[in-house]
Amino acid sequence: MMKIFPKIILKRGKEKPILRGHPWVFSGAVAKAEGDLSPGEMGEVYSGDGKFLGIGQFNPRSQIILRLLTRKKETLDSSFFRERILQAAILRERELKGKTDAYRVINGEGDFLPGLIVDRYGETLVLQCLTAGMERLKGLLVDLLVSHFNPKTIYDRSDVPYRREEGLPEAKGLVYGKEILGPVEIEEYGCRFRVDVKEGQKTGFYLDQRGNRFSLQKVSRGKKILDCFCYSGGFSIHAGLGGAKEMTMIDSSEEALERVKDHFALNHLERFSPRLIKGDAFEVMRGLETDYDVIVLDPPPFAKKKGHLPGASRGYKDLNLQAFRLLKKEGLLFTFSCSHHMSWDLFQKIVFAAAVDSGKNVQVLSRMGHPIDHPVNLSHPEGEYLRGLVLRVL
């Protein structure tokens, strides 16, 4: 027998986003609720005229009161979640085998598992349960991940502020296997990195920039590179293996710059003596001379909320203006935004304004975004956050 779920009934007309495939229901769209809507509980959603729309995970403490898992009347048991995980894993294993042993296994809404992130670093999996629903299923999810991937370790990095909006405390620690005693070594298109999965940014590494780093590697031969907000040196290591002539790297963290040195040694790039500058990239760039062939701008998110966009826009414009000033003729700019609220249109307008103010003629060579292991549900554009442009200065 099918389980009798609690349910919500939407206001008339509010079912349209779900009918178009969007996985979220906002609390303001709900006309009434029936049954126990405790955080993380499974439940059904119906239109105002009584039409069944799907089953998802409730959280009345969140503005997003329900995250849809299926639009069918079906049993959401271990078999259901095993199939979703398998579907996600097949894509990665087919496309990335032999290229890297570090990638995103499950990308939340993009893999139709809202609130769940799983990243792989060799034989270590890093888990993030961002919602009450996925937190409630954590034990089941760990068992399924162990069954399919047979990892040595699964580490929980659900230590993110977003969980507060779900009424959850931050969580962190070993949930399966061997304790992690130090950095985990990974390979990415021939580059080696050591990843601190316990304390590093995000789950330890910026996996979403992998394809873009490799693109830099292919155009770096003989070039003088400036890597701003370099963190642990991902872009610069690719540039070094691509045959770059000289590199300058800027980051505000001394610890990050120490990791850069380690990564240069790990990749046998001793022939380089990279210029490492600790400081604010905005200020450092103003004091540099104009002679770079390639500049990388990969700043942290400036607009974590929609209200931050005006200030973020000024910051992005200033950075890109300085980059255009520092580039040689025929120079390339790899410029990125990872701010969720920064649309493609706005980002390109900001970069255009910086180009105009610089007095340079600039071509767009390509757009860059998420790699294949960060798929986006076409009906959930909020899942797209990484935007990048490769520009050529004439």
Image (tube, rainbow, N blue to C red):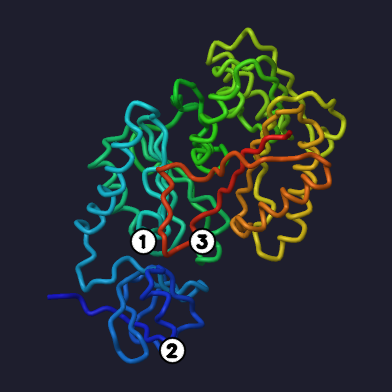
Local secondary structure at mark 1: helix
- Callout in the foreground (3, 1): 3
Mark 3 element type: helix
77 sits left or right of 360 in the view: left
Q: CA distance from mark 3 to mark 1?
A: 24 Å
Task: Identify the residue at horizontal 85%, vertical 25% (top origin).
Answer: 289
Please state which of residues 163 and 384 is positioned toward the viewer in this rendering.
Answer: 384
Q: What residue is drawn where x is 44% and y is 83%? A: 14
Q: Identify the amino acid type marked 1.
A: Arg
Is residue 318 left or right of 167 when viewed as pictured? right
The outermost residue toward the left is 1
Q: Which residue is mark 3?
A: 382
Q: Amino acid at mark 3?
A: Glu
* Residue 198 point in image, percent of width and height: 51, 37
Number of numbered markers:
3
Which of the two residues, 272 or 262, is positioned nearer the viewer here?
272
| Left or right of residue 77: residue 62 | right
Percent across and percent down for residue 47 are 35, 85
Q: CA distance from mark 2 to mark 1?
A: 28 Å
Asked if 215 appears above or below 76 in the picture, the reply is above
Q: Residues within 10 Å of mark 3 (few under 14, many from 20)?
A: some
**Which amino acid, by three-letter code, is at mark 2?**
Lys
Q: Which residue is mark 1?
A: 136
Q: CA distance from mark 2 to mark 3?
A: 23 Å
Say which residue appears at 73% left-offset and 49% top-offset. Answer: 352
Of 349 and 248, nearer the camera is 349
Q: Which quarter of the figure is the N terminus placed in?
A: bottom left
**Position above or below: 202 against 20:** above
Check disc 2 and report the residue beneath it.
Answer: 11
Q: Are marks 3 and 1 in contact (CB under 8 Å)?
A: no
Residue 281 is situated, as x and y percent measured from the top left of the image, at 77, 36
**Residue shown at the point (74%, 55%) measured from the top left:** 313
